[in-house]
Each structure stands twice: as structure tokens, then as C-alpha cells.
Image (cartoon, rainbow, N blue to C red):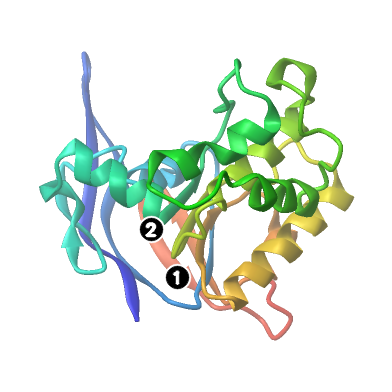
Amino acid sequence: MMLLQCEHVTRKYQKSAGSFTAVRQVDFCVHSGDFISIIGKSGSGKSTLLNMAAGLLRPTSGKILFEGNDLAAMDARAMAHLRNSRLGYIPQGLSLLANLNALDNVRLPHFLQKHEGNGVSRAQELLEQVGLRGKENSYPAELSGGEVKRVAIARALMNEPLLLLADEPTGDIDVETTQGIMDLFSTICRDGTAILMATHDLDNVGYGNRLFQMSSGSLTEEKLSEKGRL
């Protein structure tokens, strides 16, 4: 089943010296069961593309469809509902609420939609899966950068999304924890969540089934070797 479809997607930014094209005529699809890696240098357009796929940015031209629905045609309320119920998003940088502890940061999506229960068991399970057992009551200021990233990963999985958008999900995380996170991603992909991941870590590419290279805003699908490496 096709989940996400990008049709001739372009994103331009207007600057004093003229316009800058961050994403250029991108065409690709994400299907159920896909685990897609996007590699490329910083500034190549990976984050901009993921932000558009999450409905946080609108294309200058082209269309982005999720389950056949045009994201640009949705109002803010409908888009927020979609992000909270069907999409999971792990942004770059710090994204936790400083006044909530790790457990409540992970539970937050649970309360943005009508769900039964309080989500505590699910949030505790996710924190354990990302290696943060015992950190439930810690606030973001008390966590390391890598721990904060892991809380954000757990939060993105709280509502069991159909599609997980992950922007450098293993940045600032040690090698051992990175392997655990990628194993978790592999498991949730097998269980039905498609993954679209931007990464600088070529070791992460081997966990997926498709690979794209982004350069100067253009996206090209590459072949994976038998071992899933470039």
C-alpha cells in the first residue's frame, strides 16, 4: 500500500540576493513495509524534504500526498491530527518540553488524541526499548544530548504511526545505543510502520530496503549491495 507520494516537489527560499532551491523536482513513493534511508551532505535538502513530508513546510510547487490526501490542502487542525495519529516525526535538535519529565514527554501524543487509559505502560515500555529505564522522572535539563534524542524517538513511536520520519535519529548517540535504536526500527518496520530516515551514518543504511542519495536538492535512488551497503 502506498503511504507517501511526492510529485515534482520543489521548495525554494527567497533571500535578499535571490532565491535558493533547497529541494528540486523530487519524485518518490513510500510504501508499507519500506525502510528508506536518505544520505547526503549537510545542506543537501534532506531535512527540508522530511519537514515537508511531515507537513511542517509546504512545497513551493508539486504535491505531497499521504494515503492519497494532499497535505497542502489540509488546514492546520487536520494536519495536526494527521501528524499525531498517522505520522511519527523525530526532528533534528532539541524538541522536548522542558517542564515535562521523560515519561510525560513520551506520553504527550497520547493526550493530543482521544485514547483510553493514561499511556503510562506504553511510555515506560518505549523508554526501556530506547535504553532509558530508570530515567522516567528525569527532566530534559538532567539528560544528556543522546538521552534527549532517545526520549524524542520514544515519543514519536507513542501512537504507533503508519510512517516514521526520522531526521538523523542516531546523531549524538554512542555506537552501542545506535545499534539498539536501529534494531528497534527494524522491528517496528516488520510490525507495520514504514520508515523514512535521513542519516549521515552509512552503517545505518544496511538496516533498510531502499536507499536514496540527496545532492543539491535532487534525489536519486541508489542500488543496495547484497549486504545492504553502498
Q: Where is residue 75 in the image (x, y as percent from the top left)?
A: 14, 41
**Spatial CA span between label 1 and label 2:** 25 Å
Q: What element carries label 2?
A: loop
Q: Residue drawn 59% across and 26% down?
A: 94
- In this view, the residue in front, 65 or 129, is 129
Q: Residue drawn 72% across and 21% down?
A: 139
**Residue position marked by numbered label 2 in the rendering:** 86
Q: Residue drawn 39% across and 47% down?
A: 84
Report if the CB atoms under discs 1 and 2 are less than 8 Å apart: no
Residue 114 shows up from this direction: yes
- In this view, the residue in front, 6 or 104, is 104
Discs 1/2, front: 2
The quadrant holding residue 15 is top left
Q: Position of residue 67 (x, y in %)?
A: 26, 68
Q: Position of residue 140 (x, y in %)?
A: 69, 21
Q: Position of residue 145 (x, y in %)?
A: 74, 27
Q: Residue drawn 81% across and 41% down?
A: 132
| Residue extending furthest toward the left | 73
Residue 221's mark?
1
Q: Which amino acid does label 2 sit on?
A: Arg
Q: Which amino acid does label 1 sit on?
A: Glu
First in sequence: mark 1 vs mark 2: 2
- In this view, the residue in front, 207 or 186, is 186
Q: Check the picture and name the quadrant holding the N terminus.
A: bottom left
The relative height of residue 66 versus residue 125 in the rendered view (above or below) is below
Residue 230 shows up from this direction: no
* 138 on left or right of 45: right
